[in-house]
Structures are given as C-alpha cells and as structure tokens.
Image: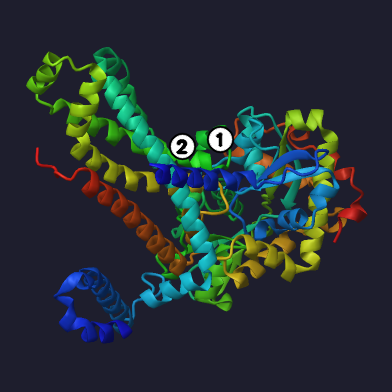
Amino acid sequence: MSGTATLAANLPVVSTGRLGAVLRPVLWLLLALAVVEAVVVVFGIRSYYLPRPSVIASTIMATPGAYLAGLWRTFLETVLGFLAGSIFGVVMAVLFHRWQTLRELFFPLFVVSQTIPVIAFGAVVVLWFGNTLFAKAVISFYISFLPVTVNTMLGFSAVDPRQVQLMRSFGAADAQILRRLYLPAALPQLFVALKLASSLALVGAIVGEWFGDTTGLGVLLLQAMYNENVAGIWATIVVSACLGMGLYGAVSYAERRIVFWGGEQ
Amino acid sequence: MFRRRTLFAAFAAAAFGLQGLSPASAQDLVNASLRLKWLTQAQFAGFYVALEKGYYKEEGINLTINPGGPNLLTENLVATGADTFGLSGGTDSVFAARDKGLPIVCIGVAHQVTPFVFVSHKDGAVQSVADFKGKTATTWFTGANHVLSAMLSKAGTSPSDVDIQPQQVSVTPFVDKQVDIVTATRYNELYVINERVGKDNLNLFVPEDSGVSFPRDTLIVSEQTAAEKPELVTKFLRASVKGWQEAFANEAEAIDIIMKISPTLNRAQQEFMLKEVKTLMTAGKASTDGLFSIDKDAVGSANNLLAEYGVISKPVDLDAAFNAGFIESIPAEERRL
C-alpha cells in the first residue's frame, strides 16, 4: 500500500508542527484501511459480506458524478431541515420557557410527535409535498427539532434566578434578559443538541429519499441494496459517513468559535 | 454579516433553483405525473424512452416521472390526486385498493403473466412442487405467498406443511442453502441468483405451470381522471406504448437513457432486466392484442385466488376495477411490437 510508504517518509515530521496534527488522523485512517484490505484478502472474506476498501473506492470512482450529485442533494436537504429544526427548536424553547401554560399544553404533543415512526410519517409528507427537496427537508426538520427544544429548555433552567433578579433590579426588559442572560447560558447545552440534530437531520434526509426520488444518497443506498450491489452499499455508507462527519465537524467548529468559554458551567 | 447573508442567499437559490428547472415551456401542455412502483430501472424503460423522445409532449402532456420506493403505495398517491397516473404493484394491489374503496381504475396491464418464479437448487432435495413439503421457503407477503399456497394446494400439499417465511431483500440465505426455496422476479432476483449459483444449477417453478396466474405492473388512474379526462388517459397510453415499442426495438439506447438517470446501476443487469420485461410484456394476450392488454381471464383468476385466501373480502367487480376501453381504443396493430 502506498499509505505505508508515506507513513514511513513522514514519521520524523509527524510529532512536530500543525501539519502533523492534520496528517496524523489521515495516516491512521490509511493504515486502518490497509489493515482491513489485508484482512479481507488474507481470510478470503467473500465480497458480499465485506468488499475490499479498494473495491469500494473504485466503485465510487466509476461513477463519481452520481455520488457527488447524491451528496449535494442530500446535503441541501439536511442543511435546510437542520436549520429549520434548530431555529424552530430554539424558538419553541423560548416560548415554552416564557409561558408555562403553553408548555403544559404543547410539550406533551412534541414528545408524542417523536414517537411516530418517520417511515409512517414519510408517506404522508410525500402526499402533501410531493417528491420535492422541500419534502425531504420537512422530514429532516421533523426528527431534528426536539433535542434542540429539550436541551435549550434545560440550559434555561440552569440559569441562577438571582442573576435574573439582579438584571430586573437594573430595569432590564424581558427581551434583554433573554438575549444577554438566558440564551448565552443555554449555548453549551444548545450545541450538544445541535451536534445531535445534525446527525438526525442527515438520517431524516436519507430516509426521506426512500419515498421516491431520483438523486440523493438514500436513493443510491436503496438501489444498491435491492440490486444486491454490496460494493455500492458500502460506497454510499462511506459517502454518507463523510457527509455526517462534515456536518458534525462544522457544528463543532462553530461551537469552539461561539462558546469560547467552553461548557464550564 | 454581509458575507454570511450572500452565502445564505446563494444557498437558498441553489436549493430552490433545482426545483425551478422543471420545464415551464409551452403553455398548451397539460401537466401530469406518473408514479412508478420502484426506483428508476430498466423495468420502466419504455416510459423513460417516451419521455426522452418527446412522445408525451407530442400528445400534449408535460409528464413528470416520479420514482417509487418502499412503503409508498402508488394506489394511494393516485387516488388522492398526488399523481395522475401510476404504475402500481399489480392485480393484487389493484384488488386490495378497490376492496378498501380507493377510487382507482386499472387502464392497462404490463406484465401479462406472473413475473416471479420459485427457485430451488438442482442438487438439493426439491425437484418438484410436491417436494416443497417439510422444506423452508421464503417469499413476499404481498401476494406471492398466496400464489405459492395455490401452487401447493394444486400439487396436493397443504401450505401449512411448508415453512413459509417472509423474504428479505437479499437472496444470500438461498445461495448459502439456508433456505430451500426462494421467490425471484425474472427480471431482478433471478439475475443475482444466476450470477451466484449458475443458471444450470437451478430448478424454476413457474406459477402458470400450476395453472395460477398473477399479472403484475398495472397502470392505474383515479376514477375522476378516467371520467373527466378520458382523452388524456388515451393520449398517455398511446405515448407510453410508443415508448415501449421504441425501447424494445432499440434496447441499447433504452438502457443508455436509464443509465444516464441512474449511473450507479449495473448495465449488464439492466440489459437482462429489459429482455425479461419484454418477455413478460409480450406474453399471453399481449402477443395478439398488443402491449398493456387487459386479459380478463388472467385477472379474474387472480381475483378469485385473492378472494379464496381472504385477502379481499369478496371478489372485486372486474369491470369497474379494470377498464379496457382506453387501451382498446388504440388499434391492436399499433400496440403490437
């Protein structure tokens, strides 16, 4: 494997510098892939149980356009659903926090909504919204907003009431208290939920694509599954995993930049 | 802030631009959609060929083809008006829908004979339908199970003497000889089994040989469309028939069209699929009367079978569920290959 050669060449540099920090996980990944490849070959594992990583790679490279188009489409669906779910989740948390009655009335409904399997809900979404990108984003939205609401409410409840009273005594309005105290206090909790929601939104988008579509990672997955194209299944899993890691990474990056004080509470 | 906003705008434009691509050209075209029973593949080549070659446009229809998927019931989508036309599961799903009171009508049958067979290993214990007794079989519980039961009854075996299990996506359990009999559509699973076990190492049990017929892949419309827009239905059928004739006359090009939409498909498998679909679509009554003929005898036998096994509460009114008028308004010579 070429990975081993690069590994050897880079060994002295790895321990120092930023380049090493970037390269190290890549090298570990290459090494792990080489090991899997060797295991599959040495133990003669049949290709429909586990295809060699090189076969999976060449499957992607055979029709890169299809995988890229699928990736892009699923990315759009996921991000639309994720953004909508996050915003809706936070807004609902604020409303529930501000008006206790609202919370008592509707929060149980939120929980109930999550017990409906997405598969059952998906058929209805197709009836309502057709085979559009929007329909998939709706499913993404549907399964991603609850953790955001729950965690934001948890963050709000952790605020010291004396701090609220202090701000009140200085004449702060409700909106100011929300913006300057509650929301910043809930940010660490919120980001935990956002990381969760980003993965859920991706699952939602992929499942949404199982209700009839022409492009998307979900379509590729389904097609490969029913044609018993095992290399194709793995290729799609790899591409989905990359997308999932990318989304998670993006949220983590935003967290490090925005919640610079960390989750110290 | 400005940069973030432009980024978002570009993003939204990209997201919604994709939907704006659907042709909004000539205004005299009637918008309609066709919901398939499954994802894009050679099984539906004729419709894609007709779309690509503009046959629907020539008939004044701006057609969108919506692929299907698991857990999507074409009958529901057509009955509610979400889709104009549907290529649904088959006579089984049409009967089930009519039995439940869904206002849909079948306007053409694609696969004139049962598209699936039961398969066993040639070197195994199962050499005839009578040998199924005491063995393990997997099948789909969407109608194929009743075909199997009927075949067993006719061979003098009680269905309860066979261990019939629901069949999962993969045929690997059969290939590994964990099950004795597997159900395979001629155009899909059979290809995989042929590839992995070898065509000459298999016994095929054909439902028609036991006197059971189960035509599948039915074209449906809602009762409302059939009553209010009969000319749209006929035009759709005429263009579809033309598309299928073209697909069978020029198979390589038809596969090109499919592969362009779904490039990850296996070309050899798609070529096999189209050949098998051609056999299914030109069998029986279609060999004399042309594509999409409705064979009331075959359909009636499926009707009785389902009623006998209690899948539908009583035999469905065939004339209300199957309207052959539309397809028969196109002369048979125009529908033959």
Residue type (three-letter) at the residue carrying disc 1: Phe
As rendered, which of B195 and B235 lies closer to the eye?
B235
| The C terminus of chain A: image quadrant | top left
Which quadrant of the figure has residue B276?
bottom right
- Mark 1 and mark 2 in contact (Cβ < 8 Å)? yes
What is the tally of numbered marks visible in this picture?
2
Secondary element at image label 1 = helix
Q: Position of residue B258 (x, y in %)?
A: 66, 62
Disc 2 crowd, CA 10 A, few/some/many (<14, 14-19, 20+): many
Residue B179 drawn at (x, y percent): 43, 63
**Residue B229 badge:** none
Instruction: Give the mark nearest the N terminus, 2 or 1.
Output: 1
Residue on which disc 1 sits = A129
Q: Is residue A179 visible?
A: yes
**Residue identifier under label 2:** A138
Disc 2, SS: helix
